[in-house]
Structure formats: structure tokens, C-alpha cells
Image: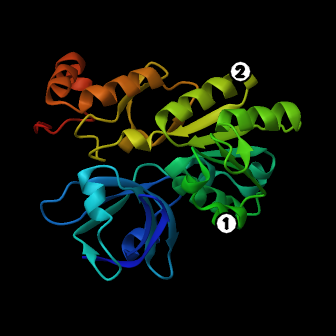
Amino acid sequence: MFEIIKKETLAPNIYLMDINAPRVAKSCYPGQFVIVKMDEKGERIPLTICDYDREAGTVTIVFQALGSSTRRMAEYEAGESFRDFTGPLGCKSELVDETPEELKKKKILFVAGGVGTAPVYPQVKWMKEHGVDVDCIIGARNKELIILEDEMKQVAGNVYVTTDDGSYGFQGNVNDCIKDLVHNQGKHYDLVIAIGPVIMMKFVSILTKELGIRTIVSMNPIMVDGTGMCGACRLTVGNQVKFACVDGPEFDGHLVDFDESMKRQQMYKTVEGRTVLREREGVTHKSGGCGCSDD
């Protein structure tokens, strides 16, 4: 059992939990994720790692209560426990394998949209711990949905907050903010890491391609099973079939077929849609395949 050490409400329906999971905390890196299962019959819920403390043996997760499982998860309180907390899964951020000297030569901009701020935080924190200053944009529909702003300001060189309705910070979406930084403030960036809703990452990638800035996106929003066996996170990257949970979740944003991915996600929500996808994609529907039904 994995005890909830701390629970905090960050915004309406957005929660932070510190989980006692020493083995996971000892092994995880920025960019990876865990699978949470509340009880023996509970749904497997993939969640990106927001933070970790190797000495304390805790892992921090942030989630939005949208479906029945995450709404039920939000009812748990500190002192209660999860049945399973499996990880770390997925590939760590490619930045972790670069030396501080190499990273310091780059101008890096992180773009966090909504709950995507949670997986951005450990990467920015990693940069800070290794002496690398980076810029970060935090975007949301309104001020009420901005999360982890204070925490991000402790680790990023510059933090730019933007809201669609202009209720806080810069008025506009994250793309408007990127354009302002590049065109009006004369900023130059060698690399953009964008994490948030798939539609946000799509349009950030379109913009950065026009600007000639290499871009990494995290396709964690499309994961369901988290092991490559269900086929939900199948996507096309540079004309190659990939699976976000085992090959990613990070990919080159300029090579991801976002439209295909979003269409598949809509189809995957129904039994009929999953049947069509299995028939259409054949042996490439799953990563390796286990022969089990995903209905």
C-alpha cells in the first residue's frame, strides 16, 4: 500500500498529492510517469511525475478530477493509501542526459499549459539544480486555473504567466506569449519544451516550426493503459508508428501527427471506435501485443 502523505487543492478540481513510494522516488527522473491504482478492481491511471524526494521517499503527483476514477481519487485524503503506485515508466527527458555545460549553451523555453505545468516543473527544477537558467510560460484559461506559479518562480530564470481571458498576467494564449517574447522583446530560443493539452502542443509546434525553433512535446495526455498493450497512445512520428507510454512520452513536436492522434483519441472512447482501430491498424495497434481484449 502507498500512503498519501499530503493532499492539496491547487485549483478547482486540480489536486496535488505526495505519495510514500521510496522505490519509485529512488529511481525516477523528470519526464517519466507512474500508474496509480486505487484498489484491486480500480482503473489504472497514468500520471506524470510532478516532483520527487529521494531522501524522504516521496513522489508528487498532480491530477485533474474529470472522469469517474479521478473524481473518486480526489476523495482520498492524507493518511489513506493507494493499492498500486507503479513506476517509474516511460523515458526520462532527453535533457537529463546532457551535461550542464551543453545545456548552458542553449536558450531554453518551457511552455506549460494547464495541468501540463506539473510535468514541466521537475524539468525546470532539474535545470536549476544543475546551474542552468531557463524561461517558462505558464498558460491557462483564467487566473483561477494557474497552478504552481510560486514553485516555478523558485526554479526558473523568468516566468511568464498568460491567461486567455486576461484575468492575470499577459492576455492571450501561450502562442501569443511566445510571439511577444520573440518579436517584441527580442528573445532568442534554441529549444522549446511544450507540455499541456494536445491541441495546445499542436499549435505551439506549428508556431515554433515557423520560427525555426526545435520543439519537444510530451504526449502523456493520450495515454490510457500506460504499458503499450491497449493501443490508445499509438501515434505517428515522422511517418513511424510510436507508442507514447513506452517510446515517449516526449517526441519531436515538428514530426508528430497531432491531427491523427486527436482523431484516434475520439474514436478510442467508444467500443465501436476501438474495433475499427484494431481492424484498421492490425499488428501495429499495440506495442508488441499481448493478445488480450481492450474492450
Say what amino acid the circle numbered 1 marks.
Asp
Q: What residue is drawn where x is 39% and y is 76%?
A: 22
Looking at the rendered structure, the secondary structure element under dot 2 is: helix
Query: Mark 1: few, some, or many residues within 10 Å (few <14, many ≥20)?
Result: few
Residue 145 position, x and y percent, is: 54, 53
Q: Which residue has dot 1 on it? A: 150
196 or 23: nearer the viewer:
196
Answer yes or no: is residue 253 visible.
Answer: yes
The answer to which quarter of the image holds residue 86 is bottom left
291 or 174: nearer the viewer:
174
The answer to which quarter of the image holds residue 7 is bottom left
Residue 62 position, x and y percent, is: 45, 61
Query: Mark 2: few, some, or many residues within 10 Å (few <14, many ≥20)?
Result: few
Answer yes or no: is residue 285 visible.
Answer: no
Q: What residue is drawn where x is 69% and y is 59%?
A: 127
Foreground: disc 2 or disc 1: 1
In which quadrant of the rendered image does the C terminus lie?
A: top left
101 or 242: nearer the viewer:
242
Q: Which residue has dot 2 on it? A: 210
Q: Is residue 129 above or below residue 184?
A: below
Of labels 2 and 1, earlier in sequence is 1
Q: Are marks 2 and 1 in contact (CB under 8 Å)?
A: no
Say what amino acid the circle numbered 2 marks.
Glu
Position of 234 with respect to 238 (left or right) is left
Label 2, label 1: how many angstroms apart (C-alpha)? 32 Å
Q: What residue is drawn where x is 12% and y is 60%?
A: 41
